[in-house]
Amino acid sequence: MPIDAIGIQIKLTRANEHLGTLTDAAGRWVNEEFRHTETEVVRGEHQWAVYRWAQMSEPDPMWGVYLGDFVHNVRSALDQIVWLCVLVNGGSPGKHTQFPFLQSEKEWTEKITSRTDGYLPPTNGVSPQVLEVIMGAQPFQFSGKERSGHPFVRLLRMSNVDKHRTLHVAKVLAGPLSISYSPEGIIKIVNLKQARTAGVVRPGAEIGRVEIEWLAKPDPSPQVRIRGDVELAFLEPGNEQPIAAVKHLNMILASTHAVVDQLVKYA
């Protein structure tokens, strides 16, 4: 393996280390901060228990730095493998040389195969075999949500935000949650009204409210169980739509490894 290719593998190893740091830190934070919820009992004709997210500390801003380092190493690994493929093919790489991220066949034609604006394509100088691999990895090979949510679309957006605009902020996303009581046979759930919990978790926001009927009065009191998935995600400040969750970072790294493993054969 050429020394340049070894450097690319080192970059991906470093990206994986940053991802591991984020995953471990997020897991510890979620386990610590999501132990409790706030409960409000509303009494009237019926008894309702209202559950809200408790106050919690903000995720460490340093996680945004780790994300930036992860993104930088992954994207530069893709750019460098293209650079190396140009050299091996006898070409002359330059400022134009990089791995493209294109979302339409029209873009591929205009920027890669039939460019007419006077600039060199980012893949100029690679062999036909390498160009075929790069084309096969493009987001436009997919449709609908698979295209807009493609790992390389997320990578490009995060790279541009981190490099040119601002640090990403970490937030917690919650999926649909369920509310139950234990032990069974103590409380009957007459009615359950779940708030729209999917999305960014906000302290004090309602999770749901339960109309309950006591079947017995135990000692100690029964335990409420609120179950569901929560995960760490990253947002651009001022934008409520997450760019990527940790699971997406794993997909980005896996997709990058797949491309590099194919292209290193030609390096």
Image: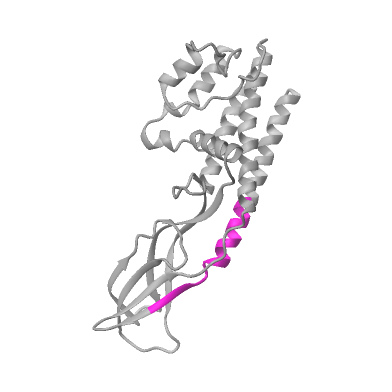
Residue occupying the point 51% across, 33% down: 152
Colour setting: one colour
Q: Extreme right residue here?
A: 3
Q: Residue 206's spot in the image, x, y percent?
A: 39, 67
Nearer to the camera, 162 or 53: 162
Considering only vertical position in the picture, is 255 above or below 264?
Answer: below
Q: Disc count in the image?
A: 0
Q: Is residue 185 magenta?
A: no
Residue occupying the point 47% across, 26% down: 102
Q: Residue 60's spot in the image, x, y percent?
A: 62, 57
Q: Is residue 24 magenta?
A: yes
Can residue 267 be seen here?
A: no
Q: Extreme left residue here?
A: 45
As drawn, is 85 to the left or to the right of 102?
A: right
Report which quarter residue 164 is drawn in.
Answer: top right
Q: Residue 160's spot in the image, x, y percent?
A: 56, 36
Look at the image and tell me in which quarter the C terminus lies.
top right
Can residue 147 be seen here?
A: yes
Considering only vertical position in the picture, is 143 above or below 58?
Answer: above
Nearer to the camera, 15 or 202: 202
Residue occupying the point 45% across, 16% down: 110
Q: Which residues are magenta?
A: 22-40
Dominant SS of magenta comes to helix
Residue occupying the point 26% across, 81% down: 46
Look at the image and tell me in which quarter the N terminus lies.
top right
Considering only vertical position in the picture, is 26 above or below 255?
Answer: below
Q: Residue 204's spot in the image, x, y percent?
A: 44, 68
Considering only vertical position in the picture, is 245 above or below 214?
Answer: above
